[in-house]
Image (cartoon, rainbow, N blue to C red):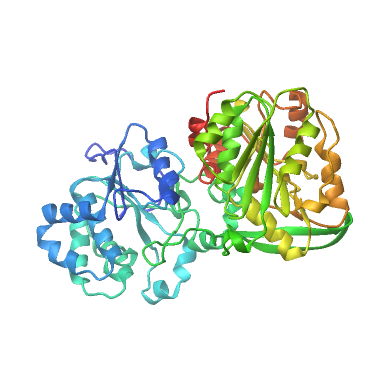
Amino acid sequence: MEALATRAPVSSGVVAIPHTIHQTWKTAELPDRFMAFARSWRVHHPRWSWRLWSDADLRAFVATHEPAFLATYDAYVHPICRVDAARYALMRHVGGVYADLDFECLAPLDALLANRELVIGVEPASHLALDAVRERGIARLPSPALLASRPGHPFWECVFECLRESAHATDPLDATGPFLLARALARYRGGPRVALVDARLLHPVDKFASADGSLFDLERWMAATDGALAVHHWAGTWFEAESDGNAAALGSAPCEVFDHGTFVHEHAIELVAGPHAEAGELPLVSALMVTRDRPALAARAIAAFRAQTWPARELVIVDDGNDALARHVAALGDPRIRHLHLRDDGTTLGELRNRALDEARGQFVCQWDDDDLCDPARISAQMQALAMTGAEACFLPRWLIWWPALQRLALSNTRLWEGSMLARRERVVRYAALRRGEDTPVAQHAFASGRSVMLHAPRLYLYTVHDANTCDVPHFERMWEAATPRWQGRDYARAMQALGNRLPLAMLAAAAPAG
């Protein structure tokens, strides 16, 4: 058996692993929460074939290729046991790469699979401390969540022997899962080698970090996945009830509380992706957008608003440009969006912001700039920070800066970022009649006029640099130089992929109306 390595020695007798990716789900329709992960396999393997197998497809495959095993397959009490057994059948008879739907590809697997006939990832060492693993004396825990095999590898015969022997095991981990794989590996002798791949390459994140939400922090995510080819998100759909994801943990976020601009204390809050309450039980938040003649950017910001998890919300759009965005909003038919199409008569940005403020119906308002993107949890997280601290205004002291034309992404320096303001309506004063810099005095007043909170969760806001910003290029170069960390090259691509799992950047661009 071959141990850890990223590349096997060249062997003229090696049978290649087919360039096919297999994934499974109950039906032929993927859940929204797994679409980005599934897409990642095709993005990084554009010339490979990809197949989604439904439960019905899997049973038909087992019936055709493992007819003697079908009775055992049908008798499994737990559906996951049938999925496990079917994936082993796929590897045995078709080969290729099998990946659970909660597995995300970060880079092509070609180099890893070259000159190998069977590859199995090893789970993180922290999982060895689990009681069930220690009781079985397992020193290296193989994961069935990602498998790569050439068809006909003799190891799978050993696996099916173990499956028949464990048919009546009550625990799916013993019957068909990683504990069974561990027994099969211990029994397998001779023949082509099995490559066990270190967790840092395929399982760089353990189930504990996935559950506690700590890797929502982009810096932590980048450090944890550095050098990895794929990452398992440990969704646990086989033993956890389906949910809408609104209560998902986003980790601990430090907060700094101020009273009339004076620091009071700091503590951390455990952020969740969204509230449990219905819209009628929550205060209305009015997101205020001013825009003119950049409908493609505005449409992305609208899509980010529609993805927000705070149910009690409205978007007020004040638009003094052409009618392209009006057509887009009308086509959406979303009653939470109110679009005011005004004549372009030279009204300043500050005056237009005042018009949006006048139209707001919410107890709380937040700035919603037309060229930036907000994480789906932005409003919920900021409202949670207000509720937990008793504050009436919330700001992000740092946010992400995205410069797509130069493929740059960075974490900003610390300051009062005006665009991140979410405050009780009474704390927001009138904007000055300026074309630029109009929001700085408003943000400063909201911060200093009562109890405020600075929420350290920069991933909530993606500030976008483009060719139509109100500031010039040297201004953004200074922002870039002041930012740390800064991500470019492969790190940029990996960071943007992580953001794209929650902000469907490519889909938003494709859906934007013509400018």
**Residue at screen point 78% across, 57% down:** 392
**Residue at screen point 16% across, 55% down:** 62
Quadrant hosting residue 430: top right
The image shows residue 182, relative to residue 325, as above or below, that is: below
Relative to the observer, which residue lies in front, 70 or 199?
70
The percent position of residue 191, horizontal first and vertical second, equals 20, 52
In the image, taking residue 133 as reference, residue 276 lies left or right, namely right
Quadrant hosting residue 179: bottom left
The percent position of residue 362, horizontal first and vertical second, equals 70, 52
Residue at the extreme left: 68
- Report if residue 407 is visible in the image: no
In the image, taking residue 68 as reference, residue 93 lies left or right, namely right
Relative to the observer, which residue lies in front, 412 or 350?
350
Q: Quadrant of the C terminus?
A: top right
The percent position of residue 496, horizontal first and vertical second, equals 55, 39
The percent position of residue 445, horizontal first and vertical second, equals 87, 47
Relative to the observer, which residue lies in front, 352 or 478?
352
